[in-house]
Image (cartoon, rainbow, N blue to C red):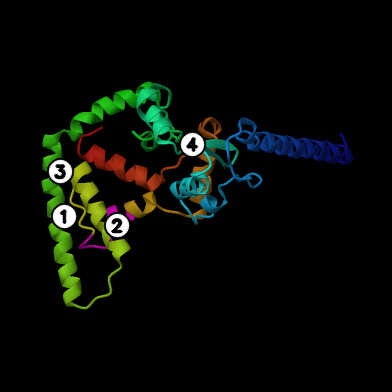
Amino acid sequence: MNPCELLQWCLAILVLLVIYIYWKTREAYKFWQSRNIPCRKPTFLVGDFADVLLGKKSLGEAAQDTYNEFKNKGPYAGFSMMLSPRLVVMDPEAIKNVLVKDFQNFNNHGSYHNEKDDPLSAHLFAVEGEKWRRLRVKLSPTFTSGKMKMMFETMMENVNELEDYMDKAVSQNSVLEIKDILARFTTDIIGSCALGIQCNTLKDTNAEFREIGRRIITNKFYTAIKRSFTTSYRNLARKLKFKIVDPKVSKFFFEHNRKNNKI
Protein backbone atom coordinates (compact mmCIF):
# COMPACT_ATOMS: atom_id res chain seq x y z
CA MET A 1 0.00 0.00 0.00
CA ASN A 2 1.49 3.32 -1.07
CA PRO A 3 1.42 6.42 1.19
CA CYS A 4 -1.44 7.98 -0.77
CA GLU A 5 -3.69 4.94 -0.28
CA LEU A 6 -2.76 4.74 3.39
CA LEU A 7 -3.73 8.38 3.85
CA GLN A 8 -7.06 7.76 2.11
CA TRP A 9 -7.81 4.81 4.41
CA CYS A 10 -6.92 6.85 7.48
CA LEU A 11 -9.16 9.70 6.36
CA ALA A 12 -12.01 7.29 5.62
CA ILE A 13 -11.70 5.71 9.07
CA LEU A 14 -11.56 9.15 10.68
CA VAL A 15 -14.69 10.29 8.83
CA LEU A 16 -16.56 7.12 9.84
CA LEU A 17 -15.48 7.61 13.44
CA VAL A 18 -16.70 11.21 13.47
CA ILE A 19 -20.03 10.16 11.93
CA TYR A 20 -20.42 7.39 14.52
CA ILE A 21 -19.67 9.74 17.43
CA TYR A 22 -22.11 12.32 16.05
CA TRP A 23 -24.84 9.69 15.63
CA LYS A 24 -24.22 8.20 19.07
CA THR A 25 -24.33 11.64 20.65
CA ARG A 26 -27.60 12.58 18.93
CA GLU A 27 -29.23 9.31 20.02
CA ALA A 28 -28.04 9.76 23.60
CA TYR A 29 -29.37 13.31 23.79
CA LYS A 30 -32.81 12.22 22.53
CA PHE A 31 -33.17 9.82 25.48
CA TRP A 32 -35.25 12.04 27.79
CA GLN A 33 -36.99 13.99 25.05
CA SER A 34 -38.28 10.77 23.46
CA ARG A 35 -39.79 9.83 26.83
CA ASN A 36 -41.47 13.23 27.31
CA ILE A 37 -39.39 13.99 30.39
CA PRO A 38 -38.33 17.66 30.69
CA CYS A 39 -34.63 18.31 30.23
CA ARG A 40 -32.17 20.94 29.04
CA LYS A 41 -30.71 20.95 25.55
CA PRO A 42 -27.34 19.21 26.09
CA THR A 43 -24.02 20.55 24.86
CA PHE A 44 -22.27 18.32 22.32
CA LEU A 45 -20.20 15.55 24.01
CA VAL A 46 -20.30 17.07 27.52
CA GLY A 47 -24.09 17.12 27.98
CA ASP A 48 -25.07 19.25 31.00
CA PHE A 49 -21.66 18.60 32.50
CA ALA A 50 -19.48 21.46 31.23
CA ASP A 51 -19.25 23.27 34.59
CA VAL A 52 -18.47 19.99 36.38
CA LEU A 53 -15.70 19.17 33.91
CA LEU A 54 -14.24 22.65 34.38
CA GLY A 55 -14.31 22.25 38.16
CA LYS A 56 -16.77 25.13 38.62
CA LYS A 57 -19.46 22.91 40.15
CA SER A 58 -19.80 19.54 41.81
CA LEU A 59 -22.09 16.80 40.51
CA GLY A 60 -24.45 17.57 43.39
CA GLU A 61 -24.64 21.23 42.38
CA ALA A 62 -25.35 20.24 38.76
CA ALA A 63 -28.22 18.03 39.94
CA GLN A 64 -29.45 20.88 42.18
CA ASP A 65 -29.52 23.24 39.19
CA THR A 66 -31.65 20.72 37.31
CA TYR A 67 -33.99 20.45 40.28
CA ASN A 68 -34.37 24.22 40.64
CA GLU A 69 -35.09 24.65 36.94
CA PHE A 70 -37.67 21.88 36.59
CA LYS A 71 -39.20 21.47 40.07
CA ASN A 72 -42.48 23.07 38.96
CA LYS A 73 -42.67 21.24 35.63
CA GLY A 74 -43.25 17.67 36.72
CA PRO A 75 -42.18 14.87 39.09
CA TYR A 76 -38.98 14.11 37.15
CA ALA A 77 -36.32 15.87 35.13
CA GLY A 78 -33.46 14.52 33.08
CA PHE A 79 -29.92 15.66 32.44
CA SER A 80 -26.93 14.24 30.59
CA MET A 81 -23.62 13.32 32.17
CA MET A 82 -21.60 13.44 28.96
CA LEU A 83 -23.51 10.76 26.98
CA SER A 84 -24.99 9.06 30.03
CA PRO A 85 -28.64 9.97 30.86
CA ARG A 86 -29.42 10.71 34.52
CA LEU A 87 -32.76 11.30 36.23
CA VAL A 88 -33.56 13.73 39.05
CA VAL A 89 -36.62 12.57 41.02
CA MET A 90 -38.54 15.48 42.59
CA ASP A 91 -41.93 14.11 43.59
CA PRO A 92 -41.97 13.06 47.30
CA GLU A 93 -44.13 10.01 46.63
CA ALA A 94 -41.85 8.87 43.80
CA ILE A 95 -38.80 9.41 46.03
CA LYS A 96 -40.45 7.26 48.71
CA ASN A 97 -41.06 4.50 46.17
CA VAL A 98 -37.44 4.61 45.01
CA LEU A 99 -35.97 4.58 48.52
CA VAL A 100 -38.45 2.22 50.22
CA LYS A 101 -41.15 0.39 48.26
CA ASP A 102 -39.16 -0.38 45.11
CA PHE A 103 -35.69 -0.11 46.60
CA GLN A 104 -34.68 -3.55 45.31
CA ASN A 105 -34.79 -2.08 41.80
CA PHE A 106 -32.85 1.08 42.68
CA ASN A 107 -30.07 -0.01 45.03
CA ASN A 108 -27.23 0.59 42.55
CA HIS A 109 -25.40 3.87 42.99
CA GLY A 110 -24.22 4.60 39.46
CA SER A 111 -20.69 5.30 40.72
CA TYR A 112 -17.49 3.91 39.25
CA HIS A 113 -15.48 1.34 41.15
CA ASN A 114 -12.77 -1.10 40.12
CA GLU A 115 -12.12 -3.56 42.90
CA LYS A 116 -9.35 -5.35 41.02
CA ASP A 117 -7.19 -2.44 39.82
CA ASP A 118 -8.29 0.28 42.27
CA PRO A 119 -9.39 -1.45 45.51
CA LEU A 120 -10.10 1.71 47.51
CA SER A 121 -12.69 2.78 44.95
CA ALA A 122 -14.86 -0.21 45.96
CA HIS A 123 -16.39 1.38 49.06
CA LEU A 124 -19.96 1.22 50.42
CA PHE A 125 -21.19 4.16 48.34
CA ALA A 126 -19.89 2.70 45.06
CA VAL A 127 -20.28 -1.09 45.08
CA GLU A 128 -23.57 -2.59 43.93
CA GLY A 129 -25.80 -5.63 44.22
CA GLU A 130 -24.81 -8.50 46.48
CA LYS A 131 -21.41 -7.00 47.29
CA TRP A 132 -23.13 -3.87 48.58
CA ARG A 133 -25.50 -5.93 50.74
CA ARG A 134 -22.65 -7.93 52.28
CA LEU A 135 -20.61 -4.81 52.97
CA ARG A 136 -23.58 -3.03 54.51
CA VAL A 137 -24.24 -5.97 56.82
CA LYS A 138 -20.57 -6.01 57.81
CA LEU A 139 -20.48 -2.28 58.58
CA SER A 140 -23.87 -1.94 60.28
CA PRO A 141 -22.59 -3.09 63.73
CA THR A 142 -20.13 -0.17 63.63
CA PHE A 143 -23.02 2.26 64.00
CA THR A 144 -24.92 0.84 66.95
CA SER A 145 -25.99 3.30 69.67
CA GLY A 146 -23.16 2.11 71.93
CA LYS A 147 -20.51 2.54 69.24
CA MET A 148 -21.90 5.96 68.33
CA LYS A 149 -21.63 7.08 71.95
CA MET A 150 -17.97 6.01 71.99
CA MET A 151 -17.39 7.92 68.75
CA PHE A 152 -19.04 10.98 70.25
CA GLU A 153 -16.60 10.99 73.15
CA THR A 154 -13.70 10.76 70.70
CA MET A 155 -15.18 13.56 68.62
CA MET A 156 -15.49 15.77 71.70
CA GLU A 157 -11.75 15.45 72.25
CA ASN A 158 -11.24 16.88 68.78
CA VAL A 159 -13.82 19.59 69.50
CA ASN A 160 -11.84 20.63 72.58
CA GLU A 161 -8.68 20.83 70.47
CA LEU A 162 -10.54 23.00 67.95
CA GLU A 163 -11.77 25.26 70.74
CA ASP A 164 -8.24 25.67 72.11
CA TYR A 165 -6.92 26.40 68.61
CA MET A 166 -9.58 29.05 67.97
CA ASP A 167 -9.05 30.71 71.36
CA LYS A 168 -5.32 30.93 70.75
CA ALA A 169 -5.76 32.30 67.23
CA VAL A 170 -8.28 34.93 68.36
CA SER A 171 -6.07 36.04 71.26
CA GLN A 172 -3.26 36.64 68.75
CA ASN A 173 -5.57 38.55 66.37
CA SER A 174 -4.70 36.05 63.64
CA VAL A 175 -6.51 35.94 60.30
CA LEU A 176 -8.50 32.69 60.23
CA GLU A 177 -9.12 30.65 57.09
CA ILE A 178 -12.28 28.89 58.26
CA LYS A 179 -12.50 26.46 55.34
CA ASP A 180 -8.97 25.17 55.99
CA ILE A 181 -9.49 25.01 59.77
CA LEU A 182 -12.70 22.99 59.46
CA ALA A 183 -11.10 20.71 56.86
CA ARG A 184 -8.29 19.95 59.31
CA PHE A 185 -10.81 19.48 62.13
CA THR A 186 -12.80 17.03 59.99
CA THR A 187 -9.59 15.20 59.06
CA ASP A 188 -8.74 14.75 62.75
CA ILE A 189 -12.21 13.36 63.48
CA ILE A 190 -12.10 10.90 60.57
CA GLY A 191 -8.63 9.75 61.55
CA SER A 192 -9.50 9.18 65.20
CA CYS A 193 -12.97 7.64 64.69
CA ALA A 194 -12.40 5.59 61.52
CA LEU A 195 -8.71 4.67 61.78
CA GLY A 196 -7.91 5.12 65.45
CA ILE A 197 -4.95 7.43 64.83
CA GLN A 198 -4.13 10.93 66.04
CA CYS A 199 -3.67 13.05 62.92
CA ASN A 200 -2.92 16.35 64.74
CA THR A 201 -3.59 18.38 61.61
CA LEU A 202 -4.88 21.30 63.71
CA LYS A 203 -1.49 21.54 65.36
CA ASP A 204 0.56 20.70 62.29
CA THR A 205 -0.65 22.07 58.94
CA ASN A 206 1.92 19.90 57.15
CA ALA A 207 0.84 16.64 58.79
CA GLU A 208 0.93 13.66 56.42
CA PHE A 209 -2.74 12.85 56.89
CA ARG A 210 -3.69 16.41 55.90
CA GLU A 211 -1.78 16.04 52.65
CA ILE A 212 -3.60 12.76 52.02
CA GLY A 213 -6.91 14.52 52.66
CA ARG A 214 -6.05 17.20 50.10
CA ARG A 215 -5.26 14.55 47.52
CA ILE A 216 -8.58 12.79 48.13
CA ILE A 217 -10.69 15.90 47.51
CA THR A 218 -8.54 17.48 44.81
CA ASN A 219 -10.53 19.26 42.12
CA LYS A 220 -7.98 19.51 39.32
CA PHE A 221 -9.19 19.68 35.73
CA TYR A 222 -7.65 16.31 34.82
CA THR A 223 -9.20 14.67 37.88
CA ALA A 224 -12.63 16.11 37.06
CA ILE A 225 -12.45 14.77 33.50
CA LYS A 226 -11.30 11.35 34.68
CA ARG A 227 -14.08 11.07 37.26
CA SER A 228 -16.68 12.24 34.76
CA PHE A 229 -15.50 9.70 32.19
CA THR A 230 -15.40 6.80 34.66
CA THR A 231 -18.88 7.66 35.96
CA SER A 232 -20.36 7.98 32.48
CA TYR A 233 -18.63 4.94 30.94
CA ARG A 234 -18.06 2.58 33.84
CA ASN A 235 -17.64 -0.67 31.90
CA LEU A 236 -15.23 0.87 29.40
CA ALA A 237 -13.25 2.50 32.22
CA ARG A 238 -12.89 -0.87 33.96
CA LYS A 239 -11.62 -2.49 30.77
CA LEU A 240 -9.10 0.34 30.44
CA LYS A 241 -8.15 -0.18 34.13
CA PHE A 242 -8.85 3.41 35.12
CA LYS A 243 -7.98 4.39 38.69
CA ILE A 244 -9.76 7.26 40.45
CA VAL A 245 -7.92 7.03 43.77
CA ASP A 246 -4.56 8.80 43.87
CA PRO A 247 -1.72 6.19 44.03
CA LYS A 248 -0.16 7.99 47.02
CA VAL A 249 -3.49 7.80 48.86
CA SER A 250 -3.78 4.06 48.19
CA LYS A 251 -0.18 3.49 49.29
CA PHE A 252 -0.72 5.45 52.52
CA PHE A 253 -3.79 3.46 53.60
CA PHE A 254 -2.39 0.07 52.59
CA GLU A 255 0.83 0.74 54.53
CA HIS A 256 -1.19 1.91 57.53
CA ASN A 257 -3.25 -1.29 57.48
CA ARG A 258 -0.16 -3.49 57.13
CA LYS A 259 1.53 -1.78 60.07
CA ASN A 260 -1.57 -2.36 62.18
CA ASN A 261 -2.11 -5.95 60.96
CA LYS A 262 -5.46 -5.14 59.34
CA ILE A 263 -4.67 -6.82 56.02
The tag earlier along the polypeptide, 2 or 3, is 3
Quarter of the image for residue 130 reads top left
Magenta-drawn stretch contains 205: yes
Q: Amino acid at mark 4?
A: Pro
Write down the region rendered in magenta.
Answer: 202-212
Residue shown at the point (18%, 47%) measured from the top left: 192
The tag earlier along the polypeptide, 2 or 1, is 1
Report the side of 191 relative to 212 (left or right).
Answer: left
Q: Which residue is mark 3?
A: 151
Q: Which residue is mark 4?
A: 75
Distance from disc 1 to disc 4, alpha carbons, whole Å, reads: 43 Å
The numbered mark at residue 183 is 2
Residue 102 at what x, y percent from top left?
Answer: 40, 23
Q: Amino acid at mark 3?
A: Met
Residue 99 at what x, y percent from top left?
Answer: 37, 30
The tag earlier along the polypeptide, 1 or 3, is 3
In the picture, the quarter occupied by the N terminus is top right
